Image: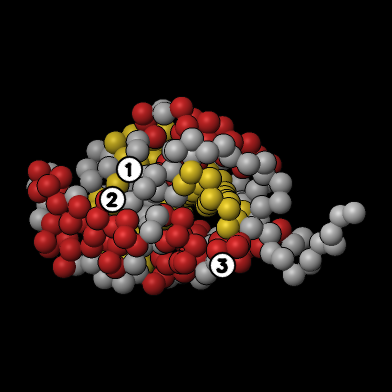
Amino acid sequence: MFAAVDARVKAPFLIVETGQPVRSMRRYGGFPHWIRVAAGLEAGETVVANVERGDALPGREGFAGVIVSGSAAMVTDRADWSERSAEWLREAAHEGLPLLGICYGHQLLAHALGGEVAYNPAGRESGTVHIDLHPHAQDDPLFSALPLKFTAHATHVQTVARPPEGATVLARSAQDDCHAFRWRDRAWGVQFHPEFATHHMRGYVHARAEHLRSEGHCPGTIARNVTAAPQARKLLRRFVRHARGLHAR
């Protein structure tokens, strides 16, 4: 005999783990933990699939939404685990499952949907950056409550060079013309890291100090300019609320 379904149990979110934080930051946990905390989710409200390690992605039924983490990997390397994940995400997007890709996840989602990912000709973007929303972002379910200009944390060398056909670019920075996009009405990618707090961002700047210096940047100045990014951080909770609302329909 089957147990009765408890209507109070919330549908979980799947977190697709595509990599690990830099070694010096792992004392704070992995990306799924950072994402879960910033999104306001309890441990029992998430399921984690570490695809980089070889975990198989589960069936899509029963999830309120999917969040794809960042990674030190490169989408352009076309690793087997990454390409399998892209295929899964492509099918999920076409089925209308709410999706949010972060950094690598943003690029992977764009690639999955037919966009192009490449090294950013403007170079590495690192630290607290200024994000400019396009005016039509004010009609977007996730971005509508954000100001047209806000700060966010970023660390990446690749970018969405060409968004997928049918995507709406929502935000840019001085170094990246596609910091956020929406595909149709239930899939989003953000190049910045809404799950990062200031200590995460400073830790990444210190970890990438040699790369930054070799590229003509001053890591000390970038670290000193790291500030809180509360508006960007709100995006994860907005995605959770929006996806739950869609799931309840």
The first of marks 2 and 1 along the sequence is 2
Q: Quadrant of the N terminus?
A: bottom right
Separation of residues labelled 2 and 1 (CA atoms): 8 Å
x and y, in percent, of residue 232 in the image? 41, 65
Separation of residues labelled 2 and 3 (CA atoms): 24 Å
The numbered dot on residue 22 is: 2
**Left or right placement of residue 10 versus residue 121 in this view:** right
Total numbered badges shown on the rendered structure: 3
Q: Find out whether the residues at labels 2 and 1 contact each other: C-beta distance under 8 Å.
A: yes
User: Can I make out residue 11 in this image?
Assistant: yes
Residue depicted at 44% across the width and 38% down the height: 52
Q: Find out whether the residues at labels 3 and 1 contact each other: C-beta distance under 8 Å.
A: no
Which residue is denoted by mark 3 in the rendering? 42
x and y, in percent, of residue 70 in the image? 40, 48
**Left or right placement of residue 21 versus residue 4 in this view:** left
The first of marks 3 and 1 along the sequence is 3
Relative to the observer, which residue lies in front, 148 or 59?
A: 59
Q: Quadrant of the C terminus?
A: bottom right
Furthest residue to the front?
A: 1
Relative to the observer, which residue lies in front, 37 or 187?
A: 37
Whether residue 164 is situated above or below residue 172 in the rendered picture: above
x and y, in percent, of residue 150 in the image? 36, 67
Which of label 3 and label 1 is nearer to you?
A: 3
Callout 1: few (<14), some (14-19), or many (20+) C-alpha neighbours within 10 Å? some
Whether residue 194 is situated above or below residue 123 in the rendered picture: below
User: Can I make out residue 182 in this image?
Assistant: no
Residue depicted at 84% across the width and 59% down the height: 3
The first of marks 2 and 3 along the sequence is 2
Which residue is denoted by mark 1 in the rendering? 72
Q: Secondary structure at mark 2?
A: loop
